[in-house]
Image (tube, rainbow, N blue to C red):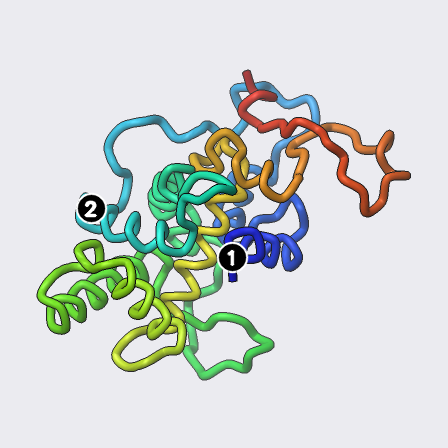
Amino acid sequence: MNRREALISLVQLSALGAIGSASAGVLANDRTLAIGTRADALPQPPQPGALAYLSADEAREVTAIFDRLIPEDELGMSASQAGCVVFLDRQLAGPYGQAASTYRLGPYLQGTPEQGPQFRLTPAQRYREGLARLAQYCQQQHGRPFSGLTGEQQDALLRAMEAGAAPLDADFFALLLQNVREGYLADPMYGGNRDMVGWRLIGFPGARYDYRPYLHRKGLPLDLEPVSLLERAS
């Protein structure tokens, strides 16, 4: 699957304004906003500086993983260049990372696929444990971290993770893939999708107020310059 197919597949599964579970954490803070609310009540973009949740080592490994899932190519910048690691770090430090919108008090029983994820751990905890297990596996098998492997070795390991080859975790791979897609397609307000690279790639016009003039152009490209919430708030 190439970059465009990987990103468009997410768009086909999500409403244009809802970017999966990371957005659920964002929406937990935003759902009370009303039209005409004060500008200072809008969600604030991540500030540059120190990491909010990930350690430096964890951020390095996430960068290496994300850049294999969405590499730099002729279509655009890589995941890390687009700010996806910053996006993830801020999300893990916030309501999404704490699973604030998820019931987690038990009882813990084996659910059906229709019931969705049944994880005891929060996303933040899953990253901490998943990255630690991955680091241990890479040291045992290769004597170096994931970020120190060749591109071919990294791809082979990620394929093994996706397949759930023991002791690697298919659920953790799915979380990584979901979050890197979210970071590449979420509004730049949240730290990713730098210069709206993801929106430009799929032709999404962004956070525009009114699409009524374009309703007759169903299935046709709108050729509109994307607009971010950052611009709306400025």
- Taking 206 as reference, is 150 above or below it? below
Residue occupying the point 84% across, 34% down: 214
Mark nearest the camera among 1 and 2 is: 1
Residue 100 located left or right of residue 149: right
Q: CA distance from mark 1 to mark 2?
A: 30 Å
Residue 43 screen position, x and y as percent: 50, 30
What amino acid is at disc 2? Ser
Q: Is residue 107 above or below residue 83?
A: below
For this view, does 37 lie left or right of residue 118? right
Splitting the image into 4 quarters, where does residue 39 fall?
A: top right
Crowding at dot 2, Cα within 10 Å, few <14 / some 14-19 / many 20+, comes out as: few
Quarter of the image with the C terminus in it: top right
Give the answer, above or below, for where 67 lies relative to 215. Answer: below
Q: Which residue is mark 1?
A: 2
Residue 80 in the image: x percent, y percent? 36, 42
Using the image, tell me which numbered label, if any, was put on residue 55: 2
Q: Residue furthest front?
A: 74
Q: Looking at the picture, does residue 174 appear above or below residue 181?
A: below
State left or right for residue 145 relative to residue 28: left
Give the mark nearest the N terminus, 1 or 2. 1
The image position of residue 32, as x and y in percent, is 61, 36
Q: Looking at the picture, tell me which residue is in the foreground, 114 or 1.
A: 1
Tell me the amino acid under the disc marked 1: Asn
Where disc 1 sits, the SS reads loop
Name which residue lies at 63% across and 29% down: 226
